[in-house]
Image: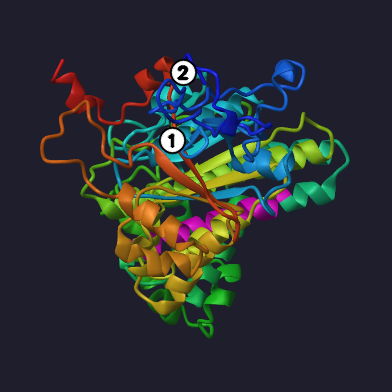
Amino acid sequence: MTGRTKPRPPERAGGHRPPARGWWGRGGGQSKVLDGPVLARGTTVQVCGLWPWVVGAGTPRAGVPLGRHLDTGATVCADPISWFRDARLIANPSLFILGLPGLGKSTVSRRMVVGLAGYGVVPMVLGDTKPDYVDAIRAIEGQVIELGPGRGSLNVLDPGESSGAAALLRDAGHPTEAAQVEADAHSRRRVIVSALIAILRKAPVSAIEESILGQALYVLDARHPGVPVLTDLLQVIRDAPDRVREVAVDRGSRQRYDEITEALEAALLSLVRGGRLGDMFSRPTSEPMRRDRPVVYDISGLPEGEQDQRAAALLACWSNGFATVNVAHTLADVGLEPRRHYLTVMDELWQALRSGPAMVDRTDALTRLNRTIGTGTIFITHTMADLASLATEEDRMKARGFIERAGMVICGGLPAHEMPMLTQVVPMSRREETLLASWATPPGWKSDRDTPPPGMGKFLVKVGGRAGIPLQVELTATEAGIHDTSHRWHEAER
């Protein structure tokens, strides 16, 4: 302590040490205010002279630097791939992000996207509705694919790079892997067409209809020399080939076949003729997706009120993205191209899950039909209420499984009434519940645009039953310029 002191009285002698703030009394050196120590971090080589006057922060150093620990000020590093691959802190490379709108969910996700791209991971943002990621992906020289009316289209029957990869695998003497790629492409196309029909009907596709679609796709692939579209699939069903009639169980009656396929034909006709979901899924793909560069599907051009159309676009983007990742992993497994690790971002999960019955199963099928090794996944939604509002208890249980299976969970500000539902899936202490609820508190009545909400950029990183890591995400000046998700409001104020 600083301060000029008089010689200590005799009763203070004898080897007694002064208290932490110095001796109290006239002429003593006690300080009324004790400044906090300067926090520093470095290697043992850099700060060896400071030992033992430093204390370990206790936070992992593996991963993308996200911000500062709210209690210690230490740097917090985290991302699902580094914590799985390098630090071995989680059992699978997946992350679920929860938080109220406007508190920075997309910001923390973008930080991981940009950071992992710097580590050599290929990020794929499979459906950007606002857009939140377009500027960031463009800044790291990635591919921006626009979808929507007057923008671009995504043919859901386009096998993408699967056909070329299968031919390459056969030429290289890998027929088994080629067959696996083709089978995966067939499954994905059947699942996505069934999902689009379910969104249109607000009812699930029947087992017979799904079998008809599957067999019709086999017939279509054998007949069509190029890349088919939904019009071609509709024509196959109308032609009633024997392979399709067999699974339709028409008992040899063409009239019975027409009755069985009438509803299916009507749904496909709606997709082809630009019904409620538009025609962007039935036209040729406007821009093929690459597997060697960061990519974002920009679907912000879709009207915000057209929830079904947005949900369908998200499902189509997810299907195409995971198909591309599967092709890349298969080719790398046999040494035909270099190994790449991918990070897939699935934002606005609630829009897809609420779009119709059995959408949880469709989403689960699309995300599970991929080779998990070498691929990390980020799911993002607002609150547990998004999952609890699904139509059936079965769907609600399955949707909670997305969080339960996640290797790590990051929570932003959440209302207090969310806590009972959240703690059923993610163990939380009472202090952590209070912390999350405090971040959901709106700013004071006299706040201006320079005063952010109390929970802006604050997050709690949870892994299993471990104590959470509270942090404040900090942006660099460069990031702040490309991470403004309210730029249309702010431009008018400049």
In terms of sequence position, does the residue under pointer 1 or pointer 2 come before the other? 2
Q: Residues within 10 Å of mark 1 (few under 14, many from 20)?
A: many
Check disc 2 and give the amino acid type.
Ala
Residue 478 belongs to magenta span: no
Check disc 1 and give the amino acid type.
Gln
Residue beneath disc 1: 472
Q: Image check: 347 left or right of 426?
A: left
Q: Nearer the viewer, mark 1 or mark 2?
A: 1
Q: CA distance from mark 1 to mark 2?
A: 24 Å
Give me the disc on residue 139. 2
Where is residue 229? Give x, y as percent: 46, 46
User: In this orientation, which residue lies closer to the viewer: 19 or 192?
Assistant: 19
Where is residue 43? Give x, y as percent: 72, 22
Q: Image check: 261 left or right of 464?
A: left
Where is residue 184? Give x, y as percent: 66, 53
Where is residue 385? Give x, y as percent: 34, 64
Residue 188 belongs to magenta span: yes
In this rendering, does residue 276 appear at all? yes
Q: Which residues are magenta?
A: 181-200
Q: Image check: 63 left or right of 209?
A: right
